[in-house]
Image: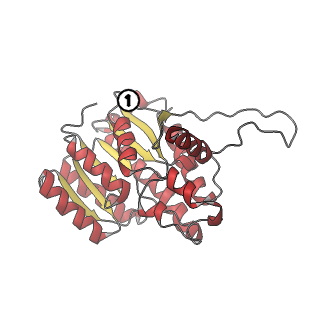
Amino acid sequence: MSLKTKNVFLTGGAQGLGRSYIDALLAAGARAFFVDINATAGEKTEKEFQEKYGKESVKFQFADCSNFAKFEESFTAAVNFLGHVDLMVNNAAILNESKYQEMIYLNYTTLVKGTLIATEHMRKDKGGKGGRIINISSDAGLETVLLGPVYAGTKHAVRAFTSCLAIAPDLDQQDIEYAVLCPCPAATDMFLNLDDNKVRHLHTLQPHVKKVITAPVECIQKGFMKLVTLEKINGAILLTSQTEMTFRRMDNVSLGESWPVERTDKMTLFDKMYEEILAQSK
């Protein structure tokens, strides 16, 4: 799908991966309206992108997405600026196990709200123009994660929620597609500046392992753009890292009638990535 003339609303776009997504979208010809709770970073990013792509191409607005009234106001402002929204990207999230209630609310509840706002705006059977909604999960939404059980729970929820929406029987009438991006840990503040409050059992993450599983932002950006520009994206779950970019499916596999059982899939995704990187470096 070409992004020229497409209009995008993105949450959490002031810095990190969100900023990289906005940059790539604008470079591909889209127009974008993004929000973030960090006003200073958002205004700086807006200025840089307006100088690079033009003032009519991009606009920032401060918004705490966990405040639903303000979230709805920002979406209305986006529609006023863009005309309509073709692509909604729910990207805003935090990683902080010590603030688990706040994390659950932002990472999942707020994402649900953003999805529902965009759906009502887009659906053709209610006067909209159709569109796409991409929800950002994580590789933690595809596996069990020692360091972040609550974080992983929110990201599993994002994946499940979005996948359920993608099988609605009236999608043809809505003309909306739903998809999920699952990035691996990226070289952003969220993962580079971990501490014992943000994650559990940090001592188990060895420095050399952290180094090799951390992907450059450009790798994740490339996966995002691959997903966004597919001709059909409904139901897609894309895992993207520095070693792979593959579509995934979650399967409910029987392990038999007794417990415990000897599992053959004990290696985590981090372990697999680590082995692959080491193999490539030899």
Q: Is mark 1 on a helix, strand or loop?
A: helix
Whether residue 13 can be seen here: yes
Image coordinates for residue 204, horizontal then vertical, percent: 65, 61
Instruction: Judge the density around disc 1: few (<14), some (14-19), many (≥20) Cα neighbours within 10 Å.
Output: few
Left or right: 109 as drawn, with respect to 32: right
Q: Position of residue 269 (x, y in %)?
A: 60, 44
**Camera-side residue of 76 and 209:** 209
202 versus 238 height, above or below:
below
On the rendered image, what quadrant is the N terminus found in? top left
Query: Which residue shows up at 54% across the image and 66% down it?
Result: 96
The residue tagged 1 is 173
Type of the residue with mark 1: Gln
197 left or right of 129? right
Residue that lies at the very extreme toward the front in this rendered image: 282
Q: Where is residue 246 in the image (x, y as percent from the top left)?
A: 48, 33
Q: Quadrant of residue 181?
A: top left
